[in-house]
């Protein structure tokens, strides 16, 4: 309903909702749930998480017709920790074997852990700390590594919500060399900059975070030149936003609001109009 009221005719939903969409059974339930309720066309992404049996889960899940299979190279939330290289390589190989499409949120988990430790020791809690936790090197290193692993396994892939022009350029170079890899950025990386995080805090908090003005201008140029394949939103409710402005910005805090509570969004959620698009509109774009 939120999408329709905003004039959007098709949406693709992320798999990090509850329950996580990491098996064919859950994918089928989610398709059925939204088939009975959606006002617009939709696609659903599936996902793969560390510590699970990729060999049995991924082929079945791909057969259940997700638009892509997502994972994170960094910690996302307790139920979706970082996918490290060994498991990532194995999962990508399986996705290649089933001719699937991998969708990767690329940030370096080790660097994030180290930065967080340093910032916590220094007692940093102000808005800026979110930016210092996740500087460009954290994303750029993971972009390059993911592109390399996709190439090694011959897997089709998308780098999602890329904030860095450097990441877009890496994908462009890889594609020119014959690799089937794509890149997405989002409206907030095109319209907002790091100073907005310092001013508005949790309302513009996202991961990867907002970047400096030079990078914003550069990624806009790359978009104009046709080097960005898709502009998506991927913005969800930030718990930080509802928690006020008292600091504690060293947590990722992103939630999918409209597929919680075991497939049944509560009346409370609905009455408050919380959802993907409402939250987007509340942002001062
Ligand atoms: Zn993500």
Image: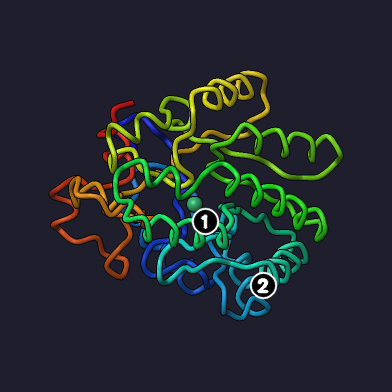
Tell me if residue 11 comes above or below residue 264 in the rendering: above
Residue 177 sits in quarter: top right
Where is residue 116? Give x, y as percent: 44, 58
Q: Earlier in the sequence, mark 2 or mark 1?
A: 1
Which residue position is annotated with label 2? Answer: 87
The numbered mark at residue 34 is none
Where is residue 247? Give x, y as percent: 25, 50
Q: Is residue 36 visible?
A: yes
Q: Quadrant of the N terminus?
A: top left
Give the tally of numbered discs.
Answer: 2
Residue 181 sits in quarter: top right
From the viewer's perspective, tell me whether residue 226 is left or right of residue 127: right
Where is residue 133? Give x, y as percent: 45, 50
Tell me if residue 203 comes above or below residue 74 in the rendering: above
Q: State the residue lying farthest toward the front.
A: 122
- Find the distance from the CA under tag 2 to the CA under tag 1: 20 Å
Residue 35 sits in quarter: bottom left
Callout 1: few (<14), some (14-19), or many (20+) C-alpha neighbours within 10 Å? many
- Of 249 and 54, nearer the camera is 249
Where is residue 26? Give x, y as percent: 45, 71
| Residue beneath the point at 25% across and 34% down | 282
Q: Are marks 2 and 1 in contact (CB under 8 Å)?
A: no
| Residue beneath the point at 77% across and 53% down | 148
Which of discs 2 and 1 lies nearer the camera? The answer is: 2
Q: Report helix, strand or loop for mark 1.
A: loop
Check the image and tell me how it is coloured: rainbow
Q: Report helix, strand or loop for mark 2.
A: helix
| Residue beneath the point at 32% across and 66% down | 263
Which residue position is annotated with label 1? Answer: 45
């Amino acid at each position: 309903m939120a999408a329709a009221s905003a004039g959007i005719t098709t949406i693709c939903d992320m798999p990090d909702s509850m329950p996580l969409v990491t098996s064919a059974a859950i994918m089928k339930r989610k398709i059925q749930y939204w088939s009975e309720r959606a006002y617009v066309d939709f696609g659903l992404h599936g996902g793969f998480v560390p510590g699970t049996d990729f060999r049995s889960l991924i082929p079945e899940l791909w057969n259940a017709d997700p638009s892509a299979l997502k994972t994170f190279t960094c910690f996302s939330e307790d139920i979706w920790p970082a996918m490290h290289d060994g498991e990532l390589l194995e999962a990508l190989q399986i996705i290649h074997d089933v001719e699937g499409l991998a969708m990767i949120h690329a940030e370096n988990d080790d660097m994030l852990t180290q930065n967080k430790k340093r910032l916590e020791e220094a007692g940093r809690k102000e808005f800026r700390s979110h930016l210092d936790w996740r500087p460009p090197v954290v994303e750029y290193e993971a972009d390059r590594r993911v592109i390399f692993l996709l190439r090694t396994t011959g897997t089709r892939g998308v780098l999602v919500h890329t904030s860095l022009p450097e990441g877009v350029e890496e994908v462009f170079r890889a594609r020119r060399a014959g690799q089937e890899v794509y890149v997405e950025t989002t409206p907030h990386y095109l319209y907002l900059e790091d100073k907005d995080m310092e001013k508005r805090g949790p309302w513009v908090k996202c991961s990867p975070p907002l970047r400096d003005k030079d990078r914003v201008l550069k990624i806009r140029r790359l978009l104009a030149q046709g080097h960005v394949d898709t502009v998506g939103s991927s913005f969800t409710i930030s718990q930080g936003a509802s928690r006020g402005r008292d600091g504690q910005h060293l947590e990722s805090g992103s939630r999918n609001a409209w597929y919680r509570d075991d497939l049944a969004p509560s009346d409370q959620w609905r009455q408050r109009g919380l959802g993907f698009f409402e939250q987007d509109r509340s942002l001062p774009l």
